[in-house]
Amino acid sequence: MSSSPIGSLSDSASKAMCPPCASPLSPSTEMSQCKESPPPQSPTVPDIPQGVNDYIQEAKAHMSQVCQDMETGISLTSHYVDVQVSQREVLRSGKNTNKCLEKELVIMGDTDRQKSLLGQSQIFGGSNDKAKRYILLLGNAGMGKTTLIKKLCLDWSKDCIPQFDFVFLLDGKQLSLTEPTFSLQTLLLNLSSYAPSCMDPEAVFAQILAAPKRVLIIFDGFNELRDYEMLLQTQEKDLVTSLLKDNKAQTFTVKQLYSAILQRVLLPGCTLLLSTRPRGSGLQVLRRTDSLLEMCGFTSTNVETYLTQYFTDPALRTSALDCLKSSSYLHLLCWNPGLCRLVCLVLEQCASLEVLPRTLTGLCHQVLCLKMVKERKNPCAEAQTQTPEQPVQDETQILNSCQVKKCDGSNQKKSRKQQHTSSGSRRSMRTKKTQVDEMDEEMKNDVEGVDRTQEGELLSQLSSLAWEGVKSNSSILPTGRAVPSKLKAFGLRMGLVLSHHLKKRPLVSNGENEGGGRGDKHEMGEVKENSGKTDTDVDDDLILLWANPFLQSYMAAVHLSLSRTVTERTFLQTLPFQSGGKGRRRPQREELELTQRFVVGLLFHNRTELQKLHLHSERTLKDVVVTKQASVMKHLEGLSYSDLSSSQVLEACHCVYEASHTSDESSRNTGNTRLLTHLAVNLPEFLTFQGVPLSPPDVFTVQNAVKRGGAEGRSFCLDLEDSGIQICGLRALVGLNNINTYRACIADVVALWEQLEQAGETELLQGAVSTFKIHPLKATQVCHIEHLEKLVKIHVQKRLSDSSSQSESILAEGVPAVKELHKLEFELGPERGPLALPKLWELLPGLPNLQHLDLEDCKIGDKEAENLANALASLCSLEKLNLSQNCVGDQGVKKLTATLKDLPKLHCLSLYSNVISDEGAESLAAALPHMASLTDLDVSYNKLTDAGVESLGASLRNCNEMKTLRMWNQCIPYGVYERLQHQDSRIKLN
């Protein structure tokens, strides 16, 4: 029994992966974004010449057609799962934003993330929002960035994004075109994806320059943030001058033009949408970005919707859903739409599989095996699948077309425009047809000449190329040397690689119709060079790409783990957690991390399965695997987990999980369980993942290690703050019986408590409340104070909500985490601090056990000082108060001292760098003798004069408990301080 596969395009492959969404549409629902919400009102449209308007309408019609296709027989309209993205924040790092220019990404909790979800109509700013001109779209491999971009292009073609007259898609792969033969005009009208042929490029380009605010330029195909950073490096002055002087001169490289657009040298008013993975340094990009979006991943509902659309046969659909629900880890992998597609490929054969894969290694191995079986049965099947007949062959070129011709034997019908092409065009077509026929014959011979032995050799060669790509952080197969045609044909048939033309058609001048004009779909996928090349050179710009990032990394791991050409030294250097210079751990790229994870999984895989991937004899394979397996075990067991960063500890959990669970139960050996036991025994007791994004599969592997630790008598304290962990994942970890304490986003914790109360899980709720900790608390976002306010309210009311009663017994003594909060650092800075101060004043009375309050650089001022004084009155346990750099003046000090002198335990007070003058010093001097517990006072860098310093010095004589008084001020003569210090040594100058 079979079913037609249904999916959506992945951001790293031409195969389709549905992007994440919050509220999926049913398969029968029309997808048009226009129906979700009214489109934003179009700004005033400048007069557009009729010829240019005709091109725009043709571009929309053309884009509507090419963006519909996802796979053969599948369109975005019928099979797209509605997608939402979350709006992420970028904040300056550091307490003093004037001293630190670096920006950092804010990792939101699950509750806040749900509130920040945006519909597609909001990506460029709604009707009431300020227009967003520099947008960054983040998402790991397979998360559906390219799918979303195609959907946006389709929406534009349907007039759902009316603020743009032109949409151009620029591909990062075109950076490999290094010759200086391009202009801004040829870049936009010739090289951009999905653009049709232009009959009057001069007029169209003139309109683009006249109204750049109505132009959207999308950059896709960039692997990491650092790829954009390279393009944002300052260009030479002469180059900038040349670009501004004549941007139609065809003397620039693609890189120079990309860089000029990104740096706003060219088309400064246009809107930019940049997609990439959230890896690598992106300081320059983040400085320019005014909107930061992130793909969210599939929810459980999305996964079910995806499978419902994927499997059209009801019986197979039911079987697939049941199998998936029985495999926890596979179900969690489906959080990534790209991996969900691979899971569906395996589920198609679930009836014939004895055991479903339980690891990422097992999943990719099973997918590869299925492709091999399918290729043996029908060598042309994959080529047919990969070669949909699209009007513009931008991702499927001559090489793929040959496969279709050979397997199908059917000729495509010509359009009316094709029938009226010029005689020169017909000659060009005949030349290319001859070339295609020659390639077709060559590929046919290659197909017939592949047997089982050659298959193993070709797999070995492909795996070697995959490793080269991972090393160079590229999905493009090496272009520096010729790849054998037989290897190309094999990779294409297997669906492991795709062919791609970097160039398309040449620009068409007024009155000409070279290459068949707008209607010739064979010509539009190719370009004819004007630099003396003949028609036989049409595929010089053809490149091969890895179709799937996960399979590329898996193939690279096959090479590292099974090839005898990889020396022991080289193999050891590729293992994870290597130290760089000066003992620092080198940051890992996503592809390399996946490859390292696959290497560990493969070496502990069933050797019968490994035999399918190589030509080694059974004995040779055993020797290779045993040797490298021993190296891996020695390496992992030699790690000091306390020296690893949080992200490296997480990756160690993944590697050990792959080693421990890739094989089925019957084929496990002692090495599998030994690694897991070693990890569980040596994990740090205080296990922190703060600042490390935790996806559902990440949580599962951590849970696996921590649970095994419980079997070994270990217990842990978990720090999950700023990890973005989903509430269901938080529940899975908190529910373990060997968790002593845990920290997480307060809003998510409260949401978990409410879920447990509604479900009647009293015992688990009791444990979740008692083990939750927030001390010490550092508030760096406004939402942190809002969440704390909600928790304090629960503590005071002793119930989760006004309507709840089941939690009254559990919260009879309040929330333990609030009672144990002794230190609160308010680090929102001068810009965001004032926004949260009112809520802070309201919640402070609910923290009677607070001992340390840090309010540095919040710009409290005299007005808010009175509110602070009222809030401090209930903090009888307060010992340290930091009010440095807060613009507090004489009136503010007066109000504060009235309260501070009644705090029985206050021993450290800092009023450093405020605006206190002699009047305020008098107020302090009068209060000091009454502050019996005060031992340290800092009033340095205020506006004190000799008189103020003298009054404080005199008051100090009546303060027997005071140990230090700092009051240095540059306006006061050093001699005055010297005399006062001689009188009382407790006066310090620094």
Image (cartoon, helix red, strand yellow):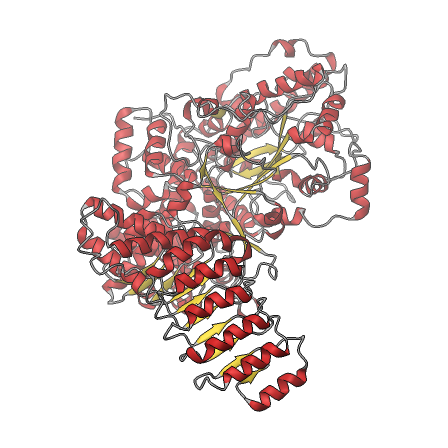
Q: Position of residue 807 (x, y in %)?
A: 20, 51
Quadrant (top left/top right/bottom left/bottom right) for the C terminus: bottom right
Position of 320 with respect to 399 (left or right) is left
Give the mark count.
0
Between 78 and 107, the one nearer to me in the picture = 107
Query: Residue at horizontal 43%, vertical 63%?
Result: 869
**In the image: residue 64, left or right of residue 672:** right
**x 51%, y 67%: residue:** 893
Residue 141 in view (yes/no): no
Q: Position of residue 967 (x, y in %)?
A: 57, 77
Instruction: Say above or below: 22 vs 575.
Output: above
Position above or below: 729 against 639: above
Percent position (x, y) of residue 905? 37, 75
Q: Nearer the viewer, residue 957 or 408?
A: 957
Residue 947 picture quarter: bottom right
Question: Where the N terminus falls, by quadrant?
Answer: top left
**Which residue: 69% across, 22% down?**
46
417 or 336, nearer to the observer: 336
Above or below for 355 versus 206: below
Residue 87 is situated, as x and y percent measured from the top left of the image, at 48, 42
**Quadrant in the picture for residue 960:** bottom left
Decide if residue 413 is on the left or right side of residue 112.
right
Horizontal side, residue 701 vs residue 256: left or right: left
Q: Name the foreground residue: 537 vs 812.
A: 812
Q: What's the residue at 73%, 12% (across, down)?
A: 423
- Position above or below: 36 against 706: above
